[in-house]
Image: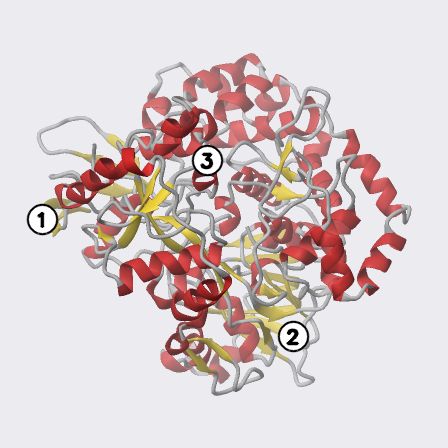
Amino acid sequence: MVEIFILGQRYEVPEGLTILKAFEWSGFHLTRGVGCRGGFCGACGTVYRLQNDHILYYALACQTVIKPGMILGQIPFFPAQHPAYRIEDLKPTGETLLQMYPELLRCYGCNTCAKACPQEIDVLNYMAAAVRGDIAAVAEISFDCISCGLCVARCPSENVPPNVSLLARRLYGKYLAPRAEHLRHRIQEIEGGTYRPEIAVLKSAPVNELRNQYAERQIEE
Amino acid sequence: MTYPAEMRASLDKVEASRPRRLTESFPRLDPQEREAILHTFHPDYIADAFREIRVGPNKGDRTPRELADTLEAPSILEHEGYNLDEILRQEPSAFCDVLVIGGGGAGASAALLAQENGADVLLCTKLRFGDANTMMAQGGIQAADKENDSPAIHYLDVMGGGGFTSNPDLVEALVMGAPKVIAWLESLGVMFDKETDGTMRTIHGGGTSRKRMHAARDYTGAEIMRTLRDEVRSRVAERPSIKVWEFRPVIELLLDEKAQIAGAILKDLDTSRLMVVRAKSVIIATGGSGRLHYQGFPTTNHYGATGDGLVLAYRVGARLAFIDTMQYHPTGAAFPEQILGQLVTEKVRGLGAQICNADGEQFVYPLETRDVEAAAFIRECKKRKRGVMTLTGQAGVWLDSPLIDLLKGPGTIARELPAMVRQYKRFDIDMTREPILVYPTLHYQNGGVAIQPDAGTSIPGLFVAGEAAGRHPRAEPVDGQQPAGRVRVRSPLRGLCR
């Protein structure tokens, strides 16, 4: 058994559990602070210290195995500003980012955000790119962000890196990435009725006929 | 090397037998053997795990006991002693045109399109907005938009993948609408993988005849979900508006005297307060039910996937369809605990990894169909007792990944499976040198609330979108159809499995 401390209370839990399962094993019925349980949704941002150690550590509760003496606290919700906007009215420029998130300029490069990131994203690097107006770099560096909010909780200049980078990724995806023209072409064909007759024939074909066609279909290499 | 000593002994046997197994191939089962193993060990055929539903529109139909129990359970109102008349005398907490239940891809899309079309929308969700299976979909999303592809070719692939049992109207809506959905997502800013000229980079999914699976690295669902969620949040101040309520699940739907949808009763999970919402129509987008852990199986599903929408719809008289079949993927992670139930892609076996039991011996051809492969793993663990047990009591069999580099040359694993290598590395397991432990995992709820092509149900004003909707019976899965199903709204039918 391993001794841990949850919200200040001592518990003993079996070795090898994740922080999340250690909570549950100890009798906590989690509503907040738990989500996909697979490391994708960012619901279970957790902070902890180890005994006789001054360092504050950060983790996703569903992805981290308990260590002896962990003193655990969760941050299930942290307030974060999000302006109202219509993506179609925005320009993919640094000015847009600054207009939506003027506090960007208050970033003084302390790097606490990157230290807090359980995804090991170089948050400071993309925040610097945001200040420079390099939307493509923000989009690229921040892509694995799961919006757990741990960097938001720690930022001394009151920035919200996940929302800044999300806006940058959307601006990149909509305006800067090359558009898929073949998609438009196909939609025009569909709306013009190009495929209606062929689908109608397939829909009314007897199952045996469909089976034959399916068996003989050409598979793209 | 983080395998504990208890598992180490078995792992040594796998390593010891590896040189011999390099040239050894386990024979495929013949058709009779396949049938026999399915009927004895596939979870869908474990008669004891099913029972007839005793009440309601599906009375007499077979379904897993866990789902039957959930459907028949008393209302929370009754169970927790609330007085319905008193609740209904309260001033409603909100009025809206459209109430969307569920905050995943289907719910977010439904909310956006309803608002664009002039409706005041309230989206309520049991957990956080965006906590959903959509967020976890890694592989991709299908649409026939390339030159060598067409909706008709897609139609045939889907029908074949569904064993020619799918509803043709729903399949037509899926294949004709899919390119529009991709274009819509692109216009919202989803960063799809593209060539420099904008051509979508697409790959094959299981059972496809054309490369039509679109991806955003291996975060496809997450990228779609966070974009949709951001779009909803950015419209909060508009008129008509989209309001979002988190941690407020619907616990009952309300009908008016004409048996039409009139709203819902919600429970605030933080305060335990009940709230009444009056709505002109309701869209159920509550996702699947893997978290009922049918027959004790692990699942790839989100924490909130407990089949709530099925119960809500059933209690107001909507019929469920195809609820006697669930999709089990044979290779879910069985160790480490952190990723229990998560998907290990079929590609690992495709590249040459063998399946071994606790003694380091093969017991099944690695590339049988998913259902047969899963049944063989279960037989090895449950009947023959030659599975490996983890510290948390999860059984599993070895997927001998290091064989791949021995068969195809050093570096193959790192090149072909980079995301998986990274995933296991997080837990100090080097899958290029050590095997990984796997067990079948609950993946997708094949059935759901019966819908028409416009997503309507038999209850006026009640619609269903995404995995909560029932579409067709037991069938071989076609990879990557589900995200398409999840984000479709104009005709929000079900996708066809991952």
Left or right, residue B300 beside residue B461: left
Kind of residue sitting beneath label 3: Leu
Chain of the residue under the numbered disc 1 shown in the image: A
Q: Nearer the viewer, mark 3 or mark 1?
A: 3
| Residue drawn at x 49%, y 25% as measured from the top left | A142
Residue named by callout 1:
A1
Residue named by callout 2:
B261
Q: Nearer the viewer, residue A144 or B16?
A: B16
At label 2, counting other C-alpha atoms closer than 10 Å, the crowd grade (few under 14, some 14-19, many 20 or more) is many
Q: Nearer the viewer, residue B135 or B107?
A: B135
Left or right, residue A115 beside residue B183: left
Q: Nearer the viewer, residue A200 or A163?
A: A200
Residue named by callout 3:
B351
Left or right, residue A185 beside residue B56: right
Kind of residue sitting beneath label 1: Met
Kind of residue sitting beneath label 2: Ile
Q: Nearer the viewer, mark 2 or mark 1?
A: 1
| Residue drawn at x 63%, y 52% as measured from the top left | B242
| Residue drawn at x 26%, y 62% as measured from the top left | B384
Percent position of residue B44, x then y: 45, 69
